[in-house]
Amino acid sequence: MLQAVDLGDHSIQRYVRVVGPDEIAELRELAAPLRGLRLMHVGSTPYGGGVSELLRSVVPLERDLGLAADWRVISGDEPFFKVTKTIHNGLQGEQRGLTPEQMEVYRDRSMSNAQLLGTEFDVIIVHDPHPLAMRHFLGTSGARWIWRCHIDTSEPHLPVWQFLEPYLADYDAAVFTLPQFVPPGFPVKRVEIIPPAIDPLSPKNMPLPQSLRHRILSWIGIDVGQPLVTQVSRFDPWKDPLGVISAYRLARQHMPELQLALVGSMALDDPEGWDIYRQIMAAAESDPLIHVFTNMTGVGNIEVNTFQRQSRVVIQKSIREGFGLVVSEALWKGTPVVAGRAGGIPMQMPEGTEEYLVDSIEDTAERVLHLLTHQNEAKRVGAAGREHVHRHCLLPRLLADELRLVASLV
Ligand code: UDP
């Protein structure tokens, strides 16, 4: 069998105090006919990145709602994850194709993972392109299959897209974050648009008292008496960490005590991370006010939570972005965000804050500085952001959307 991911027990009842009783009652109604349904999520990494963040909350709650939900990860070696990263980048528009050898690696590992899948499931949700072709290599299947695409596939590099497209033929449905992400001529008839969401009760997002926040940040070398801006992201070129350093340096010309934290996770399925990490370290040039942290050096959910709460501004300077959970995570904490005008980011920014969507390094620096020097405006953006996330980007809404889709397929 594919490797199962260990999960805790979560109770949907606890969310009543965040979203109110009606939304949870509706969720229970949606789940009632699905009691006992065997639902499997297949992903490519148990940690690092938005998909694992989501499934760690979604699957225990689906279980609590009565479904027999499960989360498994495919196995892969370095050549496979290099190929899947090329596919990921190609789907987001990078003009680089796959060699015949790379195509063979993808087919070969997809075939062996398909053999490990087992047959005892009613619905299978396949996340992102890494495990996509398993459906094809499995042949006949009694289950309903959904492909959940988390990335921006609006302008894919055609040779990469044409390689993957035939593997979608047998899917029953596909889910994208935005309508414009559906590639032209997409072969699956049933397409749903469901944006992701954050878990307000997870350690990443739960309230943390200020004294604890100060202790955590001091412990890892941040001066809590001086202003701080942060970007939290996988080390990935699409998140433009080098652009963040350049923007920060421009802003610091007007605020010499300003600190920058770049908090980045390494994911099992992302072999590019270390290269980008080295480029960041070179660009930071041992600057004592630029702090670089990773999940490999002990900066986990509580620390990320602290950075997102304690920063005066959170930056997310993405060039391409599927959704960017980090934007909702920061806004939920009332922290204003300056973010790239890319993919799913604008839908997370509340009305009246479009001016904080940026397209260049200079804009990023100027907008960050504006928020740092206009505290009332920073408060306004943070408060509007929290309200917007409350209404649109919390987990119970996502669960309801997904359960509706599953119910319509079985
Ligand atoms: N994340 C983290 N530690 C890090 C960097 C990122 O826990 O050092 C988390 C972040 O808080 C978010 C997820 O990883 O929950 C990233 O999701 P997002 O949708 O922003 O981007 P993706 O990595 O999926 O492209």
Image (cartoon, helix red, strand yellow):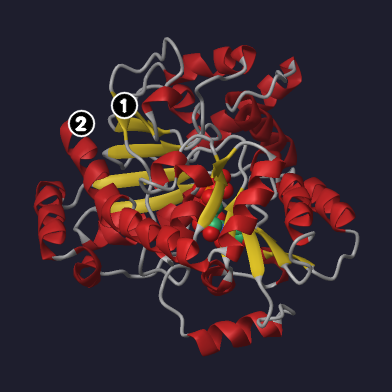
Q: Residue at x 81, y 46 (%)?
A: 275
Residue 117 visible? The answer is no
Which residue matches tag 2? Answer: 409
Categorize mark 2 by other alpha carbons within 10 Å: few (<14), some (14-19), many (20+): some
- Numbered tag placed on residue 331 in the rendering: none
SS category of the residue bearing label 2: helix
Which disc number belongs to residue 173?
1
Q: Secondary structure at mark 1?
A: strand
Position in image of residue 391 (x %, y %): 26, 54
Q: Residue at x 66, y 81 (%)?
A: 224
Please name the amino acid that badge 1 sits on. Ala
Residue 37 percent across, percent down from the top left: 21, 47
Category of crowding for the residue at label 1, using alpha-carbon neighbours closer than 10 angstroms: few (below 14), some (14–19), many (at least 20): many
Residue at 50%, 43% (x, y): give it: 355
Some atom of ligand 1 lies within 8 Å of the CB belonging to the residue at label 2 = no
Is 203 situated above or below 63?
Answer: below
Where is residue 236, by image quadrant?
A: top right
Q: Quadrant of residue 97?
A: top right
Q: Is residue 274 left or right of residue 395?
A: right
- Mark nearer the N terminus (2 vs 1): 1
Measured as percent of width and height from the top left, residue 293 is found at: 72, 65
The answer, for residue 272, to whether it is visible in the render is yes
Front position in the image: 94 or 372: 372
Which of 245 and 175 lies nearest the eye of the viewer?
A: 245
Residue 45 lies, in percent from the top left, at: 56, 50
Contact between marks 2 and 1 (CB within 8 A): the answer is yes
